[in-house]
Every structure is written in C-alpha cells, then in structure tokens.
Amino acid sequence: MNKYPPRIFSYLRGNINQSIMKSDILKINYFILFFIIFYSSCQHHQNFEKKEISNHITVPAWFIENPQISDLNLVYAYCSQYFNKKTEKKMLLSSAAENIKKSKNVALTIIQKGKHQTDRYLSNTQILESDVKIDEKELENKYTIIHQFPIGSGILALAAETKQLKNKNINVKKQMKTLNNTFPPKWVKNPPFQNGFVFGVGSAQDHSSPEKAWKVAEKNARANIALQLHTNLIYEKNEIQTSMWEWLATNHQICSSMILTNAKIIKHDYCETTKTYYALARMRIIH
C-alpha cells in the first residue's frame, strides 16, 4: 500500500522535471554567453594584432631618412597619444625641444660591466644622459612640428626650431614606406664611412609602442659614438676555471664620459624577424 497519494507522486515528478529543465536551460545559456565572449575577444585580438603589425612596419619616408636641408636642424619628436590634443601638442613640442638641445650638446656617461669568455661577451650596460632644461612657456614660440604620424599608441614627429623655418621652403617627402625587413639594415653591421664624421648604431627590442623603442635606439646610437671616441677599459681580475666545463673568464669594466656636439639622428629602420628597432647617428669630428 502506497504511503503517499498518487497526486503527491505526480507533483514531485513535475517539480523534478521542471528543475532538470531549468538546469539544462541555464547550462545552455552559460554556454552561449561563453561562446559570445570568446568569439568577441578573438575578433578584438585579431583586429588589434593586425593594427599593431601594420603600425609597426609602416612609417613616413621622412622618418626612415632625415631630410637634408641646409642650415636646418631637423629632429624627431615622440609622445603618446592623448584624447586632449592640446596636451598631445605640448608633449610633442617638449620632446622636440629636448631632442634639438641634445643634438647640439649632450653629456653622456656609459658604464659597462661584464665578463669576457673566449667567444662570448656578456655585459650589463648603463647609459646616462644629462637632463635638458625646457621652458614650457616658450615651447609654442620656439619650436614647430612640421609633420606627425600616429603609430601604435604613440606619435612620430618631425620638428625644428621656428626661427630656422623662416624664409625656408620645406619640401619633405610624405609617402609611406613599409619596413618588412627579415634582416637588419646593412648599416648596422657596416656603418657608413665619411671623412670628418663618426657614425653610431643603436638598437632596441620590441616595446609597448614603436615610438618608445626608437627613442631608446636613438639614445643607444649616441652612446655608441661616445664609446668609439672615448673609452677607458679596466680589467678587474682574472677568474680561474671552477670546472672543466667552464671557460676562463675575465671581469671587465668599460667607462666613457664625454659631451657630444652636433650629433644628429639621420636614419631609422626595423627588423620584422627579430622585432628590433634601429637608429643611426652621425657626428662631425673637429680635428
């Protein structure tokens, strides 16, 4: 004899079926929501990746090679992109002022410490550049942004002193150039040779945005000139082999401290294979 009436059993079965259906519907909804989020994130990532790759390797011709115009000191300026265009312009002008002053005079101190092991050269390099004082009140009167180009999350710009632009016909190539090099540019391994000048090559690995990497490469190019012109090499001590598997190592320290005068950045490039950014600096040597 049943303990409960038949109506109770049917009621319980109905509730159980309804709870199972609700559970299944909830799972389906979760699955659909997960799929939508996953698909949207993939699309966003692909679009962002395409944009980054495109921006990384496409730049104006005036950035690849500094336009040579007599009696005009053209420099490159960099900054991040801002929603406030007034702030963006101020940051670009500030960068232009800094780089114009550095192209005239910049004090550099390079300290390189490491080990020299047979064919291996392991080192840690520290590059210090002197601070540049900038009067923000005179930025708009003293400096001019000639061209600018958005790239990644930043901006590349070509700039000069306003007083030098008077009565000048600035004809700068505006066409774009794609940097899809699988190898570094030739001038990295074989820098140009020109009587009365010294050339320095600088590089930087992939950064959060190309303009930051090229800024570091320019600094390293100036440091390379300083190391070529003035270097003190100190061998600290010799180490003995601690096992048969180790090469004899020599600790060393390289120091260079000098003022560079009229050191200009004349070229930029990029190697897509290694994601490395390059800059070439040139400075006149006065004998």
Image (cartoon, grey):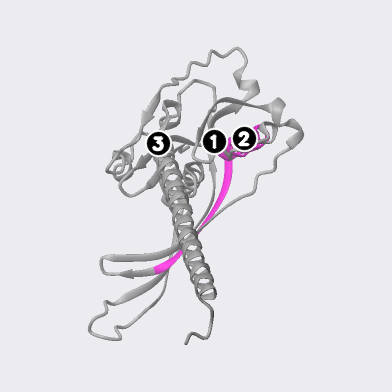
Q: Residues within 10 Å of mark 3 (few under 14, many from 20)?
A: some
Q: In the displayed structure, does residue 216 sit left or right of residue 90?
A: left
Could you tell which of marks 1 and 2 lies nearer the N-terminus? 2
Residue 103 spot, x, y in % from top left:
55, 37
Could you tell which of marks 2 and 3 lies nearer the N-terminus? 3
Tags 1 and 2 touching, CB below 8 Å: yes
Residue 226 spot, x, y in % from top left:
47, 49
214 or 71, which is in the foreground?
Answer: 214
24 or 79, which is in the foreground?
Answer: 24
Q: Residue 203 carries which label?
A: none
- Residue topped by disc 1: 155
Mark pair 1, 2: CA separation: 8 Å
Residue 2 spot, x, y in % from top left:
48, 85
For mark 1, give the secondary structure. strand
Magenta stretch? 88-114
Residue 15 spot, x, y in % from top left:
53, 68
Q: With respect to residue 63, does 32 lie above or below?
A: below
Could you tell which of marks 1 and 3 lies nearer the N-terminus? 3
Q: How crowded is mark 2: few (under 14 residues within 10 Å), some or many (20 or more)?
A: many
Q: In front of the other: label 2 or label 3?
A: 3
Q: Residue 92 carries which label?
A: 2
At label 1, the amino acid type is Ile
Mark pair 2, 3: CA separation: 23 Å
Mark pair 1, 3: CA separation: 14 Å
* Residue at far front of view: 1
